[in-house]
Amino acid sequence: MPKKSMKKEPVSTRPKYRTFFAAWRIYRGLTQEELADRMGTNKIRVSLKERDLEAWDMDYLESLSKALKVEKQALIFQDPQELHTSPEGEAWLLLDSLSDDARAKAVDYMRTLQIASRASKT
């Protein structure tokens, strides 16, 4: 009787990163299925990525950002539950409330402030 091949599943060496994908989805009041519909994917894919059981890439991050109407950086670094408790959180809320055009102008203005701040330190 031939031996069964016992294939071992490859062990993922990819480091685990905490993201706020699920927190932002919940903050926006969406189910995984509703988010998947917005992104043109399926609920299983959304669930796997939220639980870091499937790798995500910049294309996914961009799609998620657009679907949730939030900056890509916030999906990784900003817990939406903490938005109301810090100046940084208040800045996120203000940016979040702006139209796309106004948000782009606000970000340009902040870059100008950053440059000016760096120049005054030298």
Image (tube, helix red, strand yellow):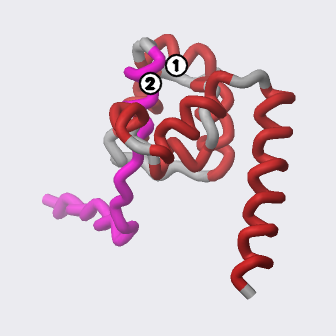
Instruction: Say above or below: 19 vs 47.
Output: below
**Magenta part mainly helix, strand or loop?**
loop
Query: Is 33 positioned to the left or the right of 121 in the image?
Result: left
Q: How crowded is mark 1: few (under 14 residues within 10 Å), some or many (20 or more)?
A: many
**Image quadrant in which the C terminus is located:** bottom right
Query: Is 36 positioned to the left or the right of 18 in the image?
Result: right
C-beta proximity under 8 Å, tags 2 and 1: yes
Residue 17 numbered tag: none
Residue 25 numbered tag: 2
Where residue 35 sits in the image (x, y, percent)? 52, 19
Q: Which residue is drawn at 21% across and 62% down?
A: 6
Where residue 58 sits in the image (x, y, percent)? 65, 51
In the figure, residue 37 lies in which quadrant? top right
Residue at the front extreme of this rendering? 120
Foreground disc of the pair 2, 1: 2
Q: Residue at x 43, y 12 (%)?
A: 29
Mark 1: amino acid: Leu
Q: Does the magenta stretch include residue 52?
A: no
Where residue 20 sits in the image (x, y, percent)? 40, 41
In the figure, residue 61 lies in which quadrant? top right
Q: Residue at x 19, y 59 (%)?
A: 4
Query: Magenta span covers which residues?
Result: 1-28
Of labels 2 and 1, earlier in sequence is 2
Query: Is 69 positioned to the left or the right of 113 in the image?
Result: left
Q: Residue at x 44, y 37 (%)?
A: 21
**Image quadrant in which the N terminus is located:** bottom left
Per the image, the residue denoted by label 1 is 35
Where residue 102 sits in the image (x, y, percent)? 82, 29
Q: Residues within 10 Å of mark 2 (few under 14, many from 20)?
A: many
Mark 2: amino acid: Arg
The secondary structure type at the circle numbered 1 is helix
Query: Is 53 positioned to the left or the right of 56 in the image?
Result: left
